[in-house]
Image: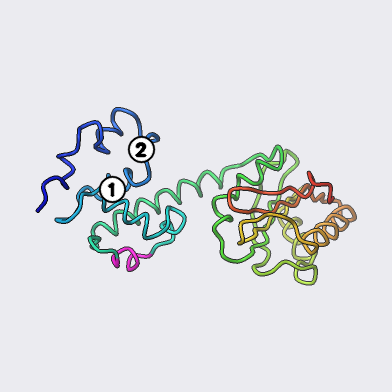
Amino acid sequence: MDQSLLIKDFPQDERPRERLVSMGASSLSNHELIAILLRTGTKDESVLQLSNRILTHFEGLQLLQHASLDEMMNIKGIGPAKAIQIIAAIEIGKRIVQRKSSQRYTIHGPEDGANYVMEEMRVLSQEHFVCLYLNTKNQVLHKQTIFIGSLNSSIVHPREVFKEAFRRSAASLICIHNHPSGDPTPSREDIEVTKRLKECGFIIGIELLDHLIIGDRKYISLKEKGYM
């Protein structure tokens, strides 16, 4: 075995655990954090090399967060114990995010609405049309997925959108949908759906504050663009 591959032979200030203690977790790279979870490498590679190979295999954290136990164990050097450690850590992270999202979140502007759903919606492979129902203080009462599929005016019926608003006694709402391509540029259908929902909200007395389109780490507000 090549002893140079052992983590103990790395300079102390380059070892992930020591770096976390001295510099904090936020200073570590993704593969260093995974290396801490794995603890050990294999006879052929260090834990840093193994963790880097995991990230390369899944093309980063975006796909890693959805990896199954079997998919993880298909990677050479990853047995049940290491796979379980990674999946458990990912699940804890997801639950923390969900807990934060479940607390009353106040929408001050388009960026707040986008941030509320960005990490969840930017990785979706299909279009999801979601509504945030707000109280009079613009706090999120409820988030509801109205439908999944390509957006068009025949599918997005105002009845389904505003039915939940009445159930939640919402004062207003924000509509959000994602573009799996990563490009949030609005289509003609996006604009038509927005105008229709805006008109219905005006008649009903529950204001549509905005319609956000989520791309990959970017978004567009149709209100800011002047479409409503």
Q: Is residue 22 above or below residue 183?
A: above
130 and 28: which is toward the camera: 28
Q: Secondary structure at mark 1?
A: helix
User: First in sequence: mark 2 or mark 1?
Assistant: 2
Q: Which residue lies at the image location 25% right of the left edge and 35% below the top edge?
A: 14
Q: Nearer the viewer, residue 131 or 120?
A: 120
Displayed quadrant of residue 113:
top right
Residue displayed at 24% across by 31% down: 13
Magenta residues (range) = 68-74
Locate residue 64 relative to residue 208 in the image: left or right: left
Q: Give the distance between the C-alpha atoms of the residues marked 2 and 1, in whole angstroms.
A: 13 Å
- The residue wearing badge 2 is 28
Q: How is the image coloured?
A: rainbow
| Type of amino acid under label 1 | Leu
Mark 1: few/some/many CA within 10 Å (<14, 14-19, 20+):
some
Three-letter amino acid code at the position of disc 2: Leu
Left/right placement of residue 37 relative to residue 108 reads left
Residue at (44, 59) in percent of width and height: 63
Give the foreground label among 2 and 1: 2
Discs 2, 1 touching: Cβ within 8 Å: no
Residue 90's x, y, as percent?
Answer: 39, 52
